[in-house]
Image: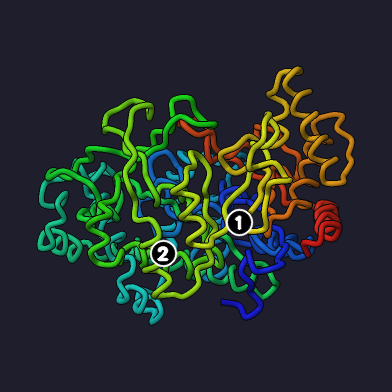
């Protein structure tokens, strides 16, 4: 940890962040990468006086392209490996680099899949497999299960492990190890992808930290069913004797969806995990804390109580609440690490148990301004936001601020504008509320002026983009996770953001 790093919720701390996932960076190769645009974005943040860059989960995506559904929870996404870095190391030719170019549009995952992995295989074919650092990385074994899983997955044409031949499905060690021994090159390819990803990631993180910019990363509460995590450690999850799920994860009807959210992830066997001191989860937190400076725990409320939905249901209306590990998990982690740099995503259905867990851990929770102005007294109004909070205009699951305003009918927009004006006046602020952009700009004033220890603006709201730039719409499967910037924010954007932070004492 950088010696200048302070906890986001340190007494008196007031800082700012920008939310932009790596995939949304601009560039020539179809998706954002850990290359020069990422470094340029760090420079933008430094120029603006921003202390935190928040990203979504970095893990390798699977079916559906969601960073919250990964083939391995601690993995890095091979799509983020920078082709230009590989070229600079002599692993790609100039012609191959040119052929890797793709339109500077939103992410087309289907085209990317068919184009990027062959390119990465060419780079790996030229990589020195006897490289000492690589050999040590493989020997360490952190990604053994991942590399085995991906190697065997290729044998079965990419199908879910539930459809593999029985001995592979049940991870019979003699069978799997024999297959890996005969397919060593494929196994090493998947190891190399993680080696290269984390080499590039830590170089970027070191660059950012040296410039006073710290990385906030997301750790999803759940893992995907078709993952190395479930395949290699089935005893940690609630599965039947055939390794099938009987109940799945989600959340009940709420602000985001009248039918709730049916995520379909396997549920943890928390009683089994309690017996070994939550070792798997503590190791997972260790990996996240090594990868990021601050970790946002997604769906934090599921650690107090979680919502279990019968497998096969078409929505999340019917389900039951079950007890999670509560603070016992974080006590085990703190026993190993000491203080934890964690932000709790405490949105959704709140009750006294979640509030107690938040108080017991001391972690800052989240406040969303787009939830604040639809009427009535609520925790998201700026006057109710306390220091031990991280405030956002919205998250990756929300409309953009401009998009939210545009989709309201005139009568309701007038009502929202009235409530925003009242919030401004209660904070001693005034601002024009004529037009979507002015209203969205007023939200930025409320965001940075409020008492939260950390205020984070999604890059879409900084640039006043509408819902064409929305990242994700919960409970839908189309056109999500594809947003990309056409260009990085400008020097004028940096100056405007710096003025906000100077005015509201967040530098």
Label 1 sits on residue = 54
Residue 205 position (above or below residue 415): below
Q: CA distance from mark 1 to mark 2?
A: 22 Å
On-image quarter of the N terminus: bottom right
Residue 280 sits in which quadrant?
bottom left
Residue 107 position (above or below residue 175): above
Q: Pointer 1: residues within 10 angstroms few (<14), some, or many (20+)?
A: many
Residue 96 image point, x, y percent:
52, 55
Residue 305 image point, x, y percent:
37, 46
Residue 360: mark in rendering: none
Local secondary structure at mark 1:
strand
Label 2 sits on residue = 330
Local secondary structure at mark 2:
helix
On-image quarter of the C terminus: bottom right
Whether residue 49 is visible to the viewer of this picture, yes or no, is: yes
Q: Nearer the viewer, residue 94 or 3?
A: 3
Q: Is residue 365 left or right of residue 169?
A: right
Residue 143 sits in which quadrant?
bottom left
Q: Is residue 372 left or right of residue 424?
A: left
Q: Is residue 157 left or right of residue 75?
A: left
Residue 369 position (above or below residue 231): above
Residue at 81%, 35% in the rendered image: 422
Which label's residue is closer to the chain start, 1 or 2? 1
Residue at 13%, 62% in the rendered image: 173
Residue at 41%, 51% in the rendered image: 221
Residue 86 image point, x, y percent:
52, 65
Count of numbered badges drawn on the protein = 2
Q: Pointer 2: residues within 10 angstroms few (<14), some, or many (20+)?
A: many
Whether residue 111 is visible to the viewer of this picture, yes or no, is: no
């Amino acid at each position: 940890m950088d010696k200048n790093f302070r906890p986001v919720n340190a007494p008196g701390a007031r800082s700012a962040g920008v939310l932009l996932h790596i995939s949304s960076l601009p560039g020539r190769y179809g998706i954002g990468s850990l290359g020069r645009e990422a470094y340029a974005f760090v420079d933008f943040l430094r120029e603006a006086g921003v202390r935190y860059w928040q990203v979504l989960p970095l893990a390798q995506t699977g079916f559906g392209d969601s960073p919250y559904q990964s083939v391995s929870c601690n993995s890095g996404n091979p799509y983020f490996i920078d082709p230009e870095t590989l070229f600079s190391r002599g692993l790609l030719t100039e012609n191959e680099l040119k052929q890797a170019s793709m339109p500077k549009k939103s992410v087309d995952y289907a085209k990317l899949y068919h184009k990027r992995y062959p390119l990465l295989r060419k780079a790996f074919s030229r990589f020195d497999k006897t490289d000492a650092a690589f050999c040590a990385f493989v020997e360490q074994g952190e990604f053994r299960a991942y590399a085995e899983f991906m190697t065997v997955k290729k044998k079965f044409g990419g199908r879910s492990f539930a459809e593999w031949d029985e001995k592979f499905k049940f991870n019979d060690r003699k069978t799997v190890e024999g297959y890996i021994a005969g397919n060593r090159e494929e196994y090493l390819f998947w190891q190399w992808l993680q080696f290269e990803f984390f080499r590039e990631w830590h170089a970027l993180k070191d660059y950012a930290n040296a410039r006073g910019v710290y990385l906030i990363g997301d750790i999803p509460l759940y893992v995907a069913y078709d993952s190395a995590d479930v395949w290699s450690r089935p005893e940690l999850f609630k599965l039947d004797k055939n390794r099938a799920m009987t109940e799945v994860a989600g959340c009940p009807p709420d602000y985001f969806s009248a039918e709730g959210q049916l995520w379909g992830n396997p549920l943890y066997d928390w009683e089994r995990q309690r017996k070994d001191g939550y070792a798997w989860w503590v190791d997972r937190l260790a990996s996240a804390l090594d990868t990021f400076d601050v970790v946002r725990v997604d769906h934090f409320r599921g650690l107090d109580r979680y919502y279990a939905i019968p497998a096969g249901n078409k929505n999340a209306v019917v389900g039951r609440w079950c007890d999670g590990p509560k603070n016992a998990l974080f006590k085990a982690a703190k026993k190993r690490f000491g203080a934890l740099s964690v932000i709790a995503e405490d949105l959704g259905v709140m009750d006294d148990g979640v509030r107690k867990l938040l108080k017991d851990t001391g972690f800052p929770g989240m406040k969303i301004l787009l939830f604040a102005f639809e009427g009535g007294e609520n925790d998201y109004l700026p006057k109710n936001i306390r220091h031990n909070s991280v405030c956002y205009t919205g998250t990756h699951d929300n409309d953009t601020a401009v998009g939210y305003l545009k989709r309201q009918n005139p009568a309701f927009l007038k009502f929202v504008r009235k409530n925003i004006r009242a919030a401004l006046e209660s904070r001693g602020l005034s601002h024009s509320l004529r037009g979507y952009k002015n209203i969205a700009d007023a939200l930025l004033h409320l965001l940075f002026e409020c008492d939260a220890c950390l205020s984070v603006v999604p890059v879409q709201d900084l640039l006043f983009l509408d819902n064409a730039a929305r990242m994700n719409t919960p409970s839908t499967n189309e056109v999500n996770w594809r947003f990309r910037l056409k260009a990085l924010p400008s020097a004028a954007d940096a100056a405007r953001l710096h003025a906000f932070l100077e005015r509201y004492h967040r530098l």
